Image: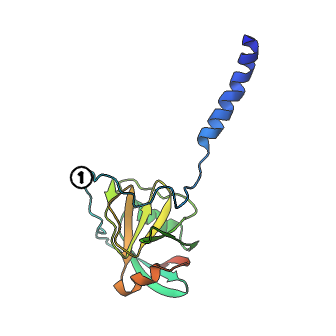
Amino acid sequence: MSSAIARRTPALVLVLAAAACTTSRPTPSSEPSTARRPAQTSEASSEPSDRSTPMNLRLTIDGHQVDAILNDSVAARDLTELLPLALDMEDFHQTERIAYPPRKLDTTGAPAASNPKAGDLAYYAPWGNLAFFYRDGDHSPALAILGRLTDPDDIDRLATAERIRIEASA
């Protein structure tokens, strides 16, 4: 009996290791990207930092061009490495439209949490999704603000957006 267990142990370890390494994308009904959790004691600003050379973006939202500017964060710079991007969007909690880039972004040095405002472009690290806020959101751990739309009149376009193209702009 002990030799049978000894023969099966490596296979069991392999199966458990493989199961632990798999990941699945959460469904929008599981945990919101702006989850309501107790506020942390230190709160970082969600305002974009100054850049010596601002990164302007051109967003095409369902065929309409909209301008945005990125801050000088590691995650924002990492996003520019993926451009141009064309992504399908879905609504999340009637506050933001979310889309998934082809890989997770580097959030080194990002604030522990942010307070998103309508017009903000953000990245929710646990899910690996971009978030485009058309309403103010709640204080959210692991949400990094990447930038914002430059014209407040364009914010309403996000509420019904189905597809977005993101590219660098001069």
Residue at 42 percent across and 56 percent down: it is 107
Percent of width and height locating residue 27: 55, 58
Question: Which residue extends farthest top?
Answer: 2
Residue at 35 percent across and 75 percent down: it is 118
Q: Callout 1: few (<14), some (14-19), or many (20+) C-alpha neighbours within 10 Å?
A: few
From what the image shows, is residue 94 above or below residue 31?
below
Instruction: Mark yes or no: residue 3 visible.
Output: yes
Q: Quadrant of the rendered structure where residue 75 is?
A: bottom left
Residue at 62 percent across and 45 percent down: it is 22
From what the image shows, is residue 66 above or below residue 127?
below
Relative horizontal placement of residue 163, taking residue 150 as reference (left or right): right
Quadrant in which the C terminus appears = bottom left
Quadrant in which the N terminus appears = top right
Nearest the eye: 13 or 109 = 13
Percent of width and height locating residue 80: 48, 68
Nearest the eye: 53 or 69 = 69
Percent of width and height locating residue 160: 50, 80
Query: For the residue marked with disc 1, what is the amino acid?
Result: Ser
* Figure label count: 1
Residue at 55 percent across and 84 percent down: it is 62
Percent of width and height locating residue 6: 71, 17
Relative horizontal placement of residue 95, taking residue 104 as reference (left or right): left
Q: Which residue is mark 1?
A: 42
Nearest the eye: 85 or 89 = 89
Instruction: Mark yes or no: residue 151 visible.
Output: no
